[in-house]
Amino acid sequence: MKAQGKSGLGRRQLFHLLGAGTAAGVVGSLTAEAKADSESNDEKRKPRYTESDEVKTYYRVNRYPR
């Protein structure tokens, strides 16, 4: 028997929404990879780590060897 006035998502509608969400996620991740690849070789090799006072304090407090 069918329920009269049933509101909500049906099974097929749910699968359509899941498929659309997955496709949107894939497109989003592909654009993020393309953006990351735009970095030149010089930018990839530049030093990003700086030993600031906070980092030195962290090493000292946690007794990391130098």
Image (spheres, helix red, strand yellow):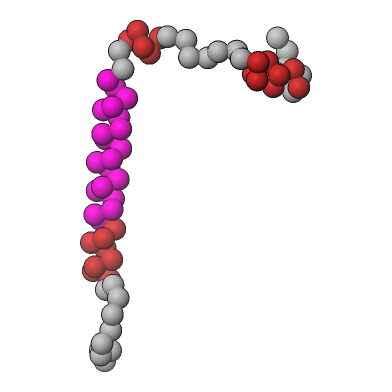
Q: Residue furthest front?
A: 53
In which image quadrant can residue 66 be found?
Answer: top right
Residue drawn where x is 76% and y is 22% of the image: 61
Residue for point 32% across, 25% down: 36
Is 26 within the magenta?
yes
Q: Find residue 55 and report its horizontal and vertical position in percent.
A: 64, 18
Number of numbered labels in the structure image: 0
Q: Position of residue 5 (x, y in %)?
A: 26, 87
Task: Name the main secondary structure of what is drawn in magenta.
Answer: helix
Residue nearer the viewer, 42 or 12: 42
Which quadrant would residue 57 be assigned to in this image? top right
Residue 51 belongs to the span the image colors magenta: no
Q: Position of residue 64 (x, y in %)?
A: 72, 17
When the figure is inspected, residue 34 is found, relative to residue 9, above or below; the finding is above
Dividing the image into 4 quarters, which one contains the N terminus? bottom left
Residue pictured at 53% horizontal, 14% vertical:
49
Residues drawn in magenta: 19-38
Q: Is residue 55 left or right of residue 31?
A: right
Q: Is residue 40 above or below residue 22?
A: above
Residue 52 percent location from the top left of the image: 61, 14
Residue lying at 28% horizontally and 50% vertically, measured from the top left: 22
Residue 13 placement: quadrant = bottom left
